[in-house]
Amino acid sequence: MASSSSKYVLGLDLGTSSIKVVLLDSQSNTVTDSCSLPTRADTSSDGKEQDPEQIILTLDQCLAALPRDKLQNVTSIGVSGQMHGVVFWNAKTGCEWSSADTGSRFIPKDVSHLITWQDGRCTSDFLSALPKPQSHLSVATGFGCATIFWYTKNRPEFLAGFSAAGTIHDYVVSMLCGAQGCVMSEQNAAGWGYFDTTTMQWNTDILKGAGFPVHLLPDLVNSGSMAGETCSEWHGIPAHTPVGAALGDFQCSVYSCMTNPADAVLNISTSAQLTYAMPAGFAPPCAPDPLSPVAFFPYFDGSYLAVAASLNGGNVMATFVGMLSAWMKEFGVEVRDSDIYSRLIERGLDQPHTDLRVTPTLLGERHDSAGRGLVASISPSNLSLGHVTRAVCRGILENVAAMMPPQMLLEAGVQRIMGSGSALSRNEVLRQEVERLFPLPVVYGKEVDSAVGVAMVLRDKQ
Ligand SMILES: Nc1ncnc2c1ncn2[C@@H]1O[C@H](COP(=O)(O)OP(=O)(O)O)[C@@H](O)[C@H]1O
Ligand SMILES: O=C(CO)[C@@H](O)[C@H](O)[C@H](O)[C@H](O)COP(=O)(O)O
């Protein structure tokens, strides 16, 4: 039961695989309640597009699991989510509000599918024909501006049906605030491409010159700023509650656990990121280096994070689980995914070493988009579930370590790795591989890191 004087910040994270919500007690800065549910919103098995209705339904289910008396005492809302992707909506009719005894909710209307960061429709030929951005960040497939270019060139009639665009978490913020357009933080804008983080401006002239529909570009605000106030009571949260501009899940997971400039953060959820903070005053290079596995993403107040953002994290294990499940179905056997995960992890733990080699880059990487996965050194004695699970988990970490080698962390003064993300917290084989590969102490967080991080940002900015 909440004391009548307790006030809470609500943190929401709209991840690629799951929604997480937390209530952070503003006074004690502790999480009092949380809920996490899988979205199962993919419209096809490759995760390229997701259904916003299903995402919002899962968000509603998570909120319904939080204590109502505490929701009535929420004083601000922070939203983070999967970066880079784009969803289109009609600014005037992007949702419908409906009321019930349990509170009001909004239902998406006149909204496109979310085209996610995993989307591969922009080939390297397509991308190389686009104008060069005026930014230190290069543009990759799955980035909002690249996807909008693709629609402009291939299906312009699709875009004609929409007047606003943003990430899925920007969409949620816009609907909560009843906004007529989209307000975007520099973190999310950097993830879309064609955004100059030093001037905090879109490359409007370059985009206009190439026929890009610039009216779809959101208005910019600093990361950590407010986007507006809730336009209605929502799941018991009073109307006129301040809502922060949506933030990147990557930056929020870092915010939840980086307590010292000598910390690196390794997050493994659907994807994986290894990052450390650049010193104060760091200015990114003038031009992008598309072949570099390390990029510099904006954090807060003009600072930057050096990040190796791998497209191949927990989704590799999820693909392995999906493959086994499909194979078993062919034999008429149905096994729950959660049972497959626990058996794989158990067997992987029984098999601490393997000579089987798995390069798990199923989606390639942004610096090597043509790359794909490989299996090598197969012998009759290394094909057990234990060997394969160990080799898959080792491969995920070896790939991250190849993108940002341990030596680079040491040279940057890193003394400790903070582990975050539920793929890491739920998989001890992955954790063992982190500790094997990186010669640094590793400290693990909880499963709901980005949701906690975005709530902490809102609390700190109040
Ligand atoms: N039962 C499970 N046991 C261990 N790992 C799991 C289980 N279910 C899912 N995972 C891992 O968690 C990943 C998704 O993590 P999650 O934090 O929900 O992602 P996101 O933040 O991207 O939405 C999956 O890709 C998979 O690797
Ligand atoms: O690619 C980057 C940063 O460039 C990622 O860090 C970023 O977190 C994206 O949001 C993801 O790829 C999606 O995150 P998640 O759902 O895997 O947690």
Image (tube, rainbow, N blue to C red):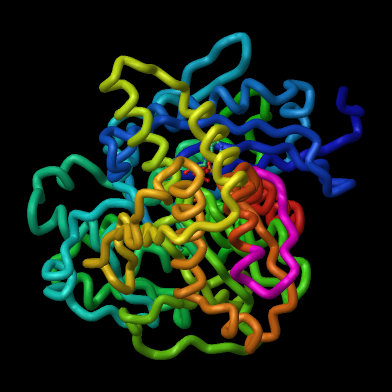
Across and down, in percent, residue 136 comes to 39, 82
Across and down, in percent, residue 78 comes to 62, 47
Residue in front for this viewpoint, 458 or 119: 119
Above or below: residue 435 compared with residue 313: below
Across and down, in percent, residue 14 comes to 51, 42
- Asked if residue 94 can be seen in this view, the reply is no
Q: Is residue 225 rendered to the left or right of residue 219? A: right
Q: Is 413 contained in the magenta span? A: no
Report the number of discs.
0
Q: Residue furthest top?
A: 101
In the rendered view of the protein, which quadrant contains the C terminus?
A: bottom right
Q: Which residues are magenta?
A: 435-447
- Asked if residue 162 can be seen in this view, the reply is yes
Picture residue at 37% right of the left edge, 28% below the top: 325
Picture residue at 45% right of the left edge, 77% below the top: 294
In the rendered view of the protein, which quadrant contains the N terminus?
A: top right
Q: Is residue 222 rendered to the left or right of residue 291? A: right
Residue in front for this viewpoint, 228 or 188: 188
Residue in front for this viewpoint, 5 or 340: 340
Picture residue at 69% right of the left edge, 53% below the top: 458
Across and down, in percent, residue 286 comes to 39, 90
Picture residue at 31% right of the left edge, 75% below the top: 203
Q: Is 436 contained in the magenta span? A: yes
